[in-house]
Amino acid sequence: MLNKIIKYFLENKLVTSMIVIGFVVWGISTAPFSWDSSWIPRDPVPVDAIPDIG
């Protein structure tokens, strides 16, 4: 099963690239940092929701 999934993504590089780009854009849109990304809607995770481990 895992071999079929790996083979699919190795053979379909366009699908793999689109998924990776989607994850990167999603990560930028939910990052709690103040990046200047006016081309993407921002919905950052509140800092209160991130636990303080230190």
Image (cartoon, rainbow, N blue to C red):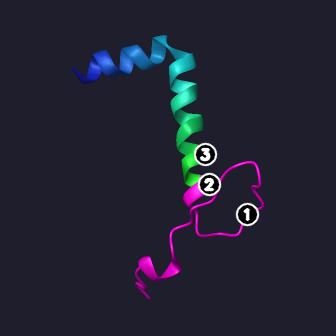
Q: Which residue is mark 3?
A: 25
- Tell whether 47 sits left or right of 42: left
Q: Which one is nearer the viewer's eye here, 48 or 7?
A: 48
Numbered circle sitting on residue 35: 1
**Do the residues under discs 2 and 1 have CB atoms within 8 angstroms?**
yes
**Do the residues under discs 3 and 1 have CB atoms within 8 angstroms?**
no
Q: Which residue is mark 2?
A: 28
How far across and down, in percent of the image, does residue 21 sit?
60, 36
Numbered circle sitting on residue 19: none
Above or below, 37 against 9 in this view is below
**Do the residues under discs 3 and 2 have CB atoms within 8 angstroms?**
yes
Question: What amino acid type is highlighted by mark number 2?
Answer: Ile
Alpha carbon distance from label 3 to label 1: 12 Å
* Residue farthest bottom in this picture: 54
- Tell whether 27 sits left or right of 40: left
Local SS, label 1: loop
Q: Quadrant of the N terminus?
A: top left
Residue 54 falls in which quadrant of the image?
A: bottom left
Question: What amino acid type is highlighted by mark number 3?
Answer: Val
Q: Mark 2 vs mark 1: which is more N-terminal?
A: 2
Local SS, label 3: helix
How far across and down, in percent of the image, does residue 6 sit?
37, 21
Above or below, 50 against 1 in this view is below
* Residue farthest top in this picture: 11
Q: Residue at x 55, y 38 (%)?
A: 22
Q: Residue at x 57, y 18 (%)?
A: 14
Which region of the structure is painted magenta?
Answer: 28-54
Above or below, 10 against 41 in this view is above
How far across and down, in percent of the image, does residue 52 sit?
43, 85
Above or below, 11 against 32 in this view is above
